[in-house]
Amino acid sequence: MLSVVTVVAAQTSKDATADAAVFASVAEHQVSQLNEGMTLARWMDAEGKMGNWRKTPEREITATDGPPPECASYFKRERLPSGAEMGRALYFYPPPAPSPATFPTLSGQELIKTCLLAVIRVEADEPALIRARTLDQAVQQRLTKQYGESIGVKNVAFWGPVHGSYQDAARWIPNAEIVSGYDVQGSSMRAEDPLVSSPFVFVHARLPLVQELRFDVAAAHRDRSREAAQFRRAVAAAGVDAALSQRIEKLYEVDVALADRLNEKAEEMYRKNPSGPPVRAEGNDWREPLLPVLQEWFKALRTSDTAHRAAGLFAADRLLTAFGSIRPWGHFGGEKSSTPKETKLRAELQNLGAVFATGFEDDSYHYTANWLDQAKQLAPDSEGGRLALLTWMSSGDPCGAAGGSDAFRKVISEGEVLLTKKIDPLTAAQVHFMVGDAYSDIVAIVGGGSGPNGEYDPSQFEGEADADRVKALQHYRAGLAVDNTSENAKDAWSQAWHLVAGFLPKEHYVCFGD
């Protein structure tokens, strides 16, 4: 005769097995939808109009470290065979720019229906570790069969749970990044919107575009090939002898290539181990030639007229900026501590006119780009002056003296004047994109998307928001008519998409913490 304990244990095991089969099946189905390119319109036709899905209420947009606000999200809560609660949540995000990035033809809700399913969460309330492992093992077996062996968590916390809160976690990265495990602390992507009670078994997955949306602001307006071409144009316009010009061009190429290579390596290492050692540059081919080249460069510019000197100042600025961007940075020492070499380098560069300053709560000295400002002001209608203006518009400090906290105003005024002058079509397209972004900043401020610390008063801009939205779209349309393949064009398309869909665009020229 079986004991009560044995009967209960058998029933518990049976319940866990039944729960595991359902939970694993649901998780596999939802993950597969990420890989299918599921649009909101397609999902609504297939599942959204049935099955007790509920639309998540609209949230106030706030500054967070997580993914940006989605187009729409839906959730549902269900019961597993044992009675345990299971929750699902789906998040739809704007699609990536098409190629070519032609101006959006749809608008409003029709455009929103093109949003892609990019994040899924499936969670089951399970406080008993033994039962939780049964559910988790069933999921891992299914996902392993579908996507191969797990690569392990590698200390990568998926959108925020504290390291160490996962039990028996696994991770896959086919098209989507998938994390499964048992969360003993009840952490979730959105603490204000938990799916189930904690602790819980979970499967979370996301497409790469979610992280791209989160981090793409820093990449905006950057085009390495265009920057290299502008540098060469400035060197030629400076009128310095050929041998020295070749040396400064070569050093610039070395520094830019090294900075990009180290950044890629750092990103790869961070994905594998966020707490790993910093990436450092090796060798001296990028370090030793800097001062001698710049000293000879400025010596050659002593007798130059304003137009040639503006071009020379622009080239010097770009070289020093490239040098300063090489990891692990801090090449100019700090206010409280500097090595003798760092102090000497900074002093010699100051003798050439470079200005250094420390950042907010940052002891390290950085170059303030004063040579760029000088080039822009010295001969504004020269080749060097215009290149300096374009560079400031694309990557200038919005909080700096050149633009102030309302840098977007200066970008609009300078850019629209520049568009009336004779500039080549591709340059004009870039100016259209940047002026469009400046107008978009005003739309974002009025919509509450900027100034979390009160840097901007939306009421001061309310009267112009509608007109500025129209102007932004006009500039994006004009730019995309010429350039619809560059990274900047893709960014402009995304901005236009948000404006046409009725969402807030991201900001480019706002000054935070002013």
Image: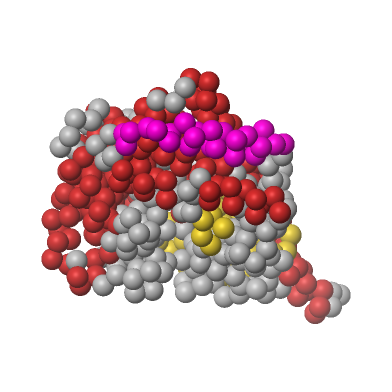
Horizontal and vertical percent position of residue 283: 72, 36
Left or right of 311, for residue 87 = right
Residue 156 position (above or below residue 185): above
Q: Is residue 294 magenta?
A: yes
Horizontal and vertical percent position of residue 5: 81, 78
Can residue 72 be seen here? The reply is no
Residue drawn at point x = 74 percent, y = 59 percent = 168
Q: In which quadrant of the rendered view does residue 492 lie?
A: top left
Colour convention of the picture? secondary structure
The total of numbered circles placed on residues is 0
Q: Is residue 285 magenta?
A: yes
512, 314: nearer the viewer: 314
Residue drawn at point x = 28 percent, y = 29 percent = 426
The quarter of the image holding the N terminus is bottom right
Horizontal and vertical percent position of residue 56: 37, 66
Q: Residue furthest front?
A: 303
Horizontal and vertical percent position of residue 215: 47, 51
Residue 236 position (above or below residue 428): above
Residue drawn at point x = 51 percent, y = 38 percent = 319
Can residue 301 be seen here? The reply is yes
Q: In which quadrant of the rendered view does residue 382 lie?
A: top left
The quarter of the image holding the C terminus is bottom left
273, 307: nearer the viewer: 307
Provide the residue span drawn in magenta.
283-307
Left or right of 118, for residue 485 = left
Residue drawn at point x = 46 percent, y = 42 percent = 317
